Image: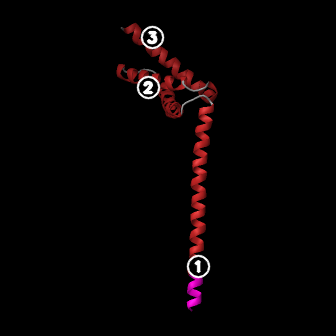
Amino acid sequence: MLYSCCIQKKEKKQQMKVAFAIIYILILLIFYLIAFAVFQIKSAGMKVKDFWTFIKANETLDKLYVFSIKYKNLTPQEQVIFLSEAEKVFSAFDKVPDVLWEEEYNKYMEVLNRYKDIRILRWTSN
């Protein structure tokens, strides 16, 4: 009875050691992947902050694209919001290589054309 209790304790300790080893390896793997991603971003000639801004701007570009397709007539307040958001997107896209966003080129151009139209419309109204 006492012998089986000691064996069970040793097995539990062994299982805990294996579990901690697996967790340790997974944590090291995560840090390695993060370091590798940062290395890849830096080797592409970008800053990590610029890349993160680009990711956020890509989400905004999708929203602006849908907005520019859906709404043809905007109120002056909506135009100002659209212009400011589009400028943020353009700024973020300028900081990354074109290769990263060539899939989004059509959306980018559609938003850019809408941006130009609104700027011309606002310029002529002033």
Image quadrant containing the N terminus = bottom right
Question: x and y percent of residue 32 in the render?
Answer: 61, 47
Within-10-Å neighbours for mark 1: few <14, some 14–19, many 20+: few
The residue singled out by tag 2 in the image is: 85
Q: Secondary structure at mark 3?
A: helix
Q: Residue at x 56, y 54 (%)?
A: 27
Distance from Cα at disc 2 to Cα at disc 1? 62 Å
Q: Amino acid at mark 2?
A: Glu
- Residue range of the region highlighted in magenta in the rendering: 1-8
Q: Main secondary structure of the magenta part?
A: helix
Nearer-N-terminus badge (2/1): 1
Kindly identify which numbered label has been placed on residue 10.
1
Nearer-N-terminus badge (1/3): 1
Residue 101 lies in the magenta-colored region: no
Q: Quadrant of residue 41?
A: top right
The colour style of the image is secondary structure
Image quadrant containing the C terminus = top left
Distance from Cα at disc 1 to Cα at disc 3? 78 Å
Question: x and y percent of residue 74 in the render?
Answer: 40, 21
**Residue 6 vertical position relative to residue 31 in the rendered view, above or below:** below
Q: Would you say the residues marked 3 and 2 are in contact, meaning their CB atoms lie under 8 Å apart?
A: no
73 or 93, nearer to the observer: 93
The residue singled out by tag 3 in the image is: 120
Q: Amino acid at mark 3?
A: Ile
Within-10-Å neighbours for mark 3: few <14, some 14–19, many 20+: few
Name the mark nearer the viewer: 1 or 3: 1
Q: Would you say the residues marked 1 and 3 are in contact, meaning their CB atoms lie under 8 Å apart?
A: no
